[in-house]
Amino acid sequence: MFSKTIVPPDEEYRSYKEALVDHHIAANIGAERFEEMVGEKARELKRTVGSLKPETIKQVSVATIRGMLLKTIPHATAEQFNASRKAA
């Protein structure tokens, strides 16, 4: 008998949003442009909060750019996503 891995609803929603952004980057922006955007954000952060470690600046830069892109992509709210999962 196989055990089914249970993924919390918030993790499923997070994965859904990550997949949307990944697809948007691949289909519309390209990896090179995405890296340029991250680099621009990193330079901005270094000027404003230069005391952070380089890896922290990179993580924050990636998260910020991905968050900005997500705002431009139509997507379900958490409530809509959870409702559609229950209906399926």
Image (tube, rainbow, N blue to C red):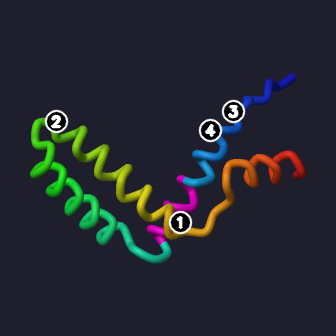
Upstream in sequence: badge 4 or badge 1: 4
Upstream in sequence: badge 2 or badge 3: 3
In the rendered image, which residue does mark 2 sit on? 53
Between the residue at mark 2 and the residue at mark 3, the CA separation in whole angstroms equals 32 Å
User: Residues in magenta?
Assistant: 18-26
Residue at x 55%, y 68% (from the top left corner): 73
Circles 4 and 1, Cβ within 8 Å, touching? The answer is no
Upstream in sequence: badge 3 or badge 1: 3
Q: Is residue 31 above or below residue 3?
A: below
**Which marked residue is nearer to the observer: mark 4 or mark 1?**
4
User: Is 4 placed left or right of 23 in the picture?
Assistant: right
User: Is 75 placed left or right of 55 in the picture?
Assistant: right
In the rendered image, which residue does mark 3 sit on? 8
Circles 4 and 3, Cβ within 8 Å, touching? The answer is yes
Q: Secondary structure at mark 2?
A: loop
The percent position of residue 67, horizontal first and vertical second, equals 44, 56
Disc 4: CA contacts within 10 A as few (<14), some (14-19) or many (>=20): few
Between the residue at mark 4 and the residue at mark 1, the CA separation in whole angstroms equals 18 Å
In the rendered image, which residue does mark 4 sit on? 11
